[in-house]
Amino acid sequence: MKKTAVVLSTVGISLALGLSGCSSNANSPSTSSPSPSGSGVGTVLPPIMITKAESITVKVGDYLNVTTPNVTKVSTDNASVLDISQPHSDGSAQFNGGAKVVGPGKANLVVYGGITNLELYSVSVTATG
């Protein structure tokens, strides 16, 4: 009987200590969401949709998403401003062509398409730091 009481007492103390880590203190409220950091690091903005010839101003870190149908390729005249990604399929999904803005400056994003792979339009991009 004494052995059972010791085991039950040990289990009870272990359980109480384990649960005390889950209790809240009146001096330190518990929250389920992280506090905002104010620095903006980690904020993801939606891509800028490209559908026609135009002049745009963007920021380094922005993404350009070419949503025009039947695009076969995209190119740039300044790879230090735009990092190009070609339209492609991985077998389960279709991916649009586009670019990531990687540096400040000016560049042209040229969009090609159709059966003949001719230039459809060009976008004049000015990127700011």
Image (cartoon, rainbow, N blue to C red):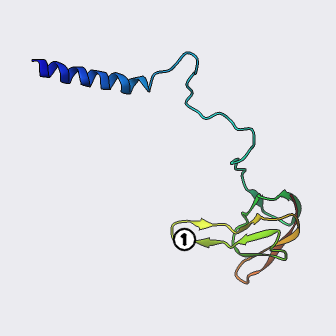
Residue for point 19% across, 21% down: 6
Residue for point 37% across, 24% down: 17
In the image, residue 12 lies at what x, y percent?
27, 21
Return the residue at label 1.
90
In the image, residue 114 lies at what x, y percent?
72, 78
Residue 69's quadrant in the figure?
Answer: bottom right
Pick the quarter of the image with the C terminus. Answer: bottom right
Pick the quarter of the image with the N terminus. Answer: top left
Residue for point 68% across, 73% down: 86
23 is higher (above) or lower (below) than 102:
above
Residue ranking furthest to the top: 26
Residue 20's quadrant in the figure?
Answer: top left
16 vs 73, nearest the viewer:
16
Instruction: Say what secondary structure mark 1 lies in.
Output: loop
6 is higher (above) or lower (below) than 89:
above
Amino acid type shown at disc 1? Asp
Crowding near the residue tagged with mark 1, few <14, some 14–19, many ≥20 C-alpha atoms within 10 Å: few
